[in-house]
Amino acid sequence: MKRRNFLKLSASASVLSLTPFELQAALKTLTSYLSCADVSNRKLVLINLAGANDGLNSIIPINQYDTYSNLRPTIKVSSAKYITLDNTLPENQQIGLNPGLASFKSLYDKGWLRILQSVGYPSQNKSHFKSTDLYLTGNDGNSRLNGEDTGWIGRFMESYYAGLVDETFPLAVEIGSNKTSLGFHTEEAVGLSLNITGQDPSGFYSVLNGLGGAVPTNIPNSDYGKQLAFINGTGMVSNTYAESVSSAFNSGQNNATYPDTDLANQLKTVARLISGDLGSKIYMVRISGFDTHNSQVQGAGEVLGKHYELLTELSGAIEAFMSDINNQNIADDVVGITFSEFGRKARENGSFGTDHGEIAPMFVFGKPIAGGVSGTNPDLTEASNTNNWQIQTVQHDYRQTFATLLQNFLGADNAIIDATFFNHTINNSFTNLKLDELLKSEFKVSSACFGGTLATQTPNEIKNWLIYPNPFSKVINISGIENINIITYNIYNSAGKLILNSSGQILNGKLSLDLAYLTSGVYFFEIIAEGKKERHKVLKV
């Protein structure tokens, strides 16, 4: 029996042992619990389009086709070759798909694909390495206040799935890169993810276990000894994770025909691991080659070339993956999303290619996704010689998309989202900036269910106050119930020692505290208002 089904039965069966008065209260809680979506087996699949995908030749702005053609006279996708996505859309959303994305048309027609226009972040950095780091750490071009050494995926997993940290499976699996992504680095826990690139998952445990050698029995009490113990511990965790991966792969299956491409093989492995009931929550795969400074097309007026081949591989692999998980009746639990570190310039460069730009589209796919287009076609008149032919208006911050999925699909509460990443540029939580049109209503987690099922919460555990940003550097804000003006708050250090007891007035919806004098570390905030208390864990960086 799958674990999520066991938990459902356990929650119901435990009611039978209660007294009549307890039964009434329990049934009320159970009713609330059953009204919450079951998110226990939901997964995210991230596809990294490494190198910076050219958005304008992926989705062609039909309403500005003449301007587009003038900017790209030799590499444009001709009107005779692009695929009209949906002629019922408003004029400013009319899109022509590159013929390499033909498989996306069928996903869109099924209502399984949403295209997000003009995705980026404030103050775009057009270095591949720096921009990739920003995407993976949850930052933007204005600051690294969300953390430089940890990834947003790692922070999210460590906080939201804290109860699964000691499980025998990795919380995340990465395929397609020869090193573990910065995005999976965590604050405290070690090795929550596993990279299986270049390995046969069916025998992954045997391969990894055979590399370990003898484990030292006498570890010295020294810096060297501590490092050796760390390496040994990491190796033991990897062995345990590898065994789970191999077991899930061998018990899983595929039920679709995949193209013979690298990305298709990666997604085929992901589908089989999900089918085999691996408990991992986040998967990341990778397709590289999108840095198309030249040979983006093979000649003037041609659509064939590097970019067409990449888009064909991308859309074909995703279509096969969706067919696979849908045929196995596990598609309700899976959402996928593409991301690329930045886009390309609006104007071609004279080498049948394009140079580094700022914005790029995102493709979000899955059965739970509400098909459609978010945003309008980028305004091509923005691009001019004075701004180096850049389209600079960001319609969607990349973290809006991820925050929406982490909360509305996976069920994380506001505090978890703010601990994952916060919009320091405009001093606002991404929980206030979500894309509510992203998911079909039947797959959305109710706000009453954020943070886990109500069956595992008491009323006092439901948070009424928001503490942000988290992590914070100097100033932290407290906001919450509108009709409360004065609150008392206590701050404890990680050892539980009270270090500050005070009160303050809520002005303009928040109480701001300058805590720059605190040393870096974990603190607990206790907020007391109208006789009720609630506690929040925050990180000072």
Image: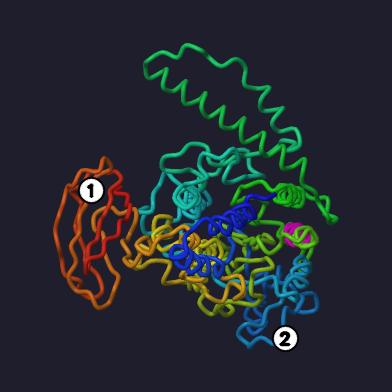
Name the front one of labels 2 and 1.
Answer: 1
Is 521 left, or right, of 190 in this rendering?
Answer: left
Task: Give 153 or 304, whichever is nearer the viewer.
Answer: 153
Q: Earlier in the sequence, mark 2 or mark 1?
A: 2
Is 432 left, or right, of 310 in this rendering?
Answer: left
On the image, the x and y values in percent for residue 257 come to: 85, 55
On the image, the x and y values in percent for residue 534 come to: 30, 60
The amino acid on which the numbered mark 1 sits, given as a three-letter code, is Tyr
Q: Is residue 61 above or below residue 170?
A: below
x 15%, y 66%: residue: 504
Check residue 87 in the rendering and tell me which mark sits there, or answer none. Answer: 2
Is 272 left, or right, of 424 in this rendering?
Answer: right
Q: Is residue 76 above or below residue 45?
A: below
**Magenta span of residues:** 308-321
Determine which residue is flagged by label 1: 492
> Overall secondary structure of the magenta stretch?
helix
x 38%, y 64%: residue: 459
Q: Is residue 388 magenta?
A: no
The amino acid on which the numbered mark 2 sits, given as a three-letter code, is Asn
Q: Mark 2: which secondary structure?
A: loop
The answer to whether residue 108 is visible is yes
Residue 38 quadrant:
bottom right
